[in-house]
Amino acid sequence: MTHLFPATALLLLQDATQAVPPPTLSHGNALTDMLHNAGAVAWTVLAVLLFGSLFSWAIIFGKWGSFRRARAQSKRFLRAFRKATRLGDIATVSEQFKPSPLVNVFDEVYETYKRQTGGYGPPKNITALERAAQTASSESLTMLEQRLTWLASIGAIAPFVGLFGTVMGIVDAFMGLGTEGTATLRAVAPGVAEALITTAAGLVVAIPAVIAYNQFTASCRDFAARMDDFARELLNSMEEAALEAHQDPGEREKARGVHH
């Protein structure tokens, strides 16, 4: 009897393994299969997210190029401005550095200066020049910030659009369970996995948009600080020119001797 028990257990184990077939492995792509079996709601959500992704990447590449050109031209313009001895010389070549927001500040201040003096002599009203510089800085900053709100909106809304697709997919899965009358993991898993695709797609769309928005916003703050610094430098040079113009020749020679 002791020898018959192991043999009987072995026969029962062989029968059990033959009765339950091994799980079949799908050689296809599981993601492709889930997309192929996705419903109308999931496809609509994915289409909306795809459009948002393409739109956000178009803004990202466009802004990246414009900010890169603005930085390069700002450096060139500052070098030219600090080497020049007359504002009129800079005004004649300012168009070459047009992508730089500093050029807008200079042009606005110089135009105000020309209206005051005709282009010669010390400025008559420094306060008006300061207001012109502030206006030009605000306009340039507004141009730099164009379309950035779209990145913020896409980064904030895309996860909720994906979550909407997930919720609707899970609702469909549970409705299918109620129709079939079976509540097993094998029955509900494909529907839940299909629904979660939309959440993943929403995150894929939102994360680059949020990162780009934060980087471009920081760049805008940096340009705003640069424009303020340049405006102060420009106005200081005009005030120094006005002080030199009010000095008599003897005092100017003494000042030059001290500087030398």
Image (cartoon, grey):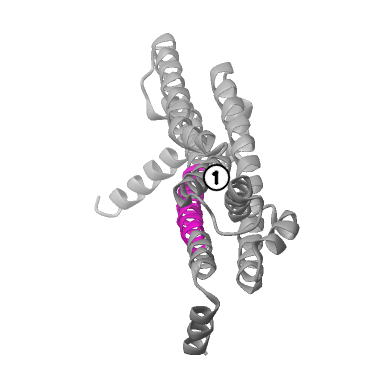
x and y percentages locating residue 232 in the rendered image: 46, 59
Tell me the kind of residue under disc 1: Ala
x and y percentages locating residue 252 in the rendered image: 52, 79
| Residue 96 visible in rendering | no
Residue 2 in the figure: left or right of residue 93? left
x and y percentages locating residue 258 in the rendered image: 47, 88
Tell me: residue 236, above or below residue 211.
below
Tell me: residue 24, above or below residue 40.
below
The structure residue drawn at horizontal position 56% and vertical position 45%, both measured from the top left corner, is 140
Q: What residue span does the magenta drawing correspond to? A: 207-233
* Residue highlighted by disc 1: 136
**Mainly helix, strand or loop, the magenta region?**
helix
The reply to whether the magenta stretch includes residue 219 is yes
Of residues 200 and 129, the one drawn nearer to the viewer in this rendering: 129
| Residue 33 visible in rendering | yes
The structure residue drawn at horizontal position 62% and vertical position 41%, both measured from the top left corner, is 59
Is label 1 in a helix, a strand or a loop?
A: helix
The structure residue drawn at horizontal position 31% and vertical position 52%, both measured from the top left corner, is 6
Residue 175 in the figure: left or right of residue 149? left
Tell me: residue 189, above or below residue 144.
above
Of residues 248 and 87, the one drawn nearer to the viewer in this rendering: 248
- Residue most toward the left? 2
